[in-house]
Image (tube, rainbow, N blue to C red):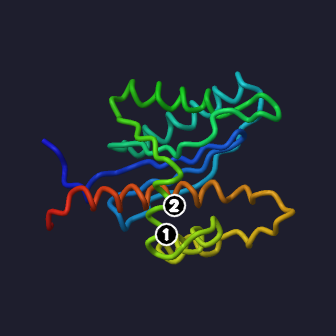
Amino acid sequence: MHPKSNDRRILAIALRSRRFGFAVFEGPNRLLDWGMVFYPLNNDVQRAAASKRVASLLTLYIPSVIVVGRTRLLNVRNGSGVRPILRSIRRESSSRLIPVHLMKRADVRKVFRLAHVKTKHEIASFVAQMFPELLWKQPPKRRIWESEHPIMAMFDAVALGFVYWQRDRARDPTPD
């Protein structure tokens, strides 16, 4: 038996080399939890720390699907990357029979382009307007010489979840 699409719980994850942002949705309009997980750059410690945190999120929220933003799998500068973290997520999810959906950055941008939202800061502002509980966490607009604010990964995760629900609605237009 397949639950109604609005009753599903999803875990959205935006990966970075030293952190990941996450958001837990129950239906398209209900954001249950959100946050950031930081871990060291050492691959063994990184893998263990991320795997432990993902396992705790899966145990706590029991999502029906995990949405992961597709990103560069390797950081060329220092040889580290998100590939071990993605493997950990896949390993944890497969042991619990939870499907993992990789979402391309182009798919995310396409959905937000329909709302005339283009930049990452505009996307974060849009998401904060959709979920007012995030307004106080919204990072300031980045200047061209500044690096990305660490909290942006969390906003990317919320945007991934939002886009997943928008695409899900488009696929299943049946009324409630």
For this rendering, which residue is in front, 45 or 153? 153
**Quadrant in the rendering for residue 152:** bottom right
* Residue 24 locus on image (x, y percent): 45, 53
**Which quadrant is home to the N terminus?**
top left
Q: Is residue 18 above or below residue 25?
A: above
**Which quadrant is home to the C terminus?**
bottom left
Q: Is residue 106 above or below residue 2?
A: below
At numbered mark 1, what does the secondary structure look like: helix, strand or loop? Answer: helix
* Residue 47 locus on image (x, y percent): 64, 27
**Quadrant in the rendering for residue 34:** bottom right
* Residue 6 locus on image (x, y percent): 26, 59
Name the residue carrying label 2. 109
In the picture provided, is 34 more to the left or to the right than 100?
A: right
What's the residue at 35%, 62% (across, down)? 166
Q: Is residue 29 above or below residue 66?
A: below
What's the residue at 42%, 31% (across, down)? 93
In the picture provided, is 168 more to the left or to the right than 172?
A: right
Name the residue carrying label 1. 113
What's the residue at 63%, 51% (across, down)? 36
Query: How far is mark 2 from mark 1, CA to CA?
Result: 6 Å
Characterize the local packing of mark 1: few (<14), some (14-19) or many (20 or more) Cα atoms within 10 angstroms. few
Residue type at mark 2 is Arg
Residue furthest out toward the right: 145
Residue type at mark 1 is Arg
* Residue 79 locus on image (x, y percent): 78, 28
At numbered mark 2, what does the secondary structure look like: helix, strand or loop? Answer: helix
Q: Dots 2 and 1: beta carbons under 8 Å?
A: yes
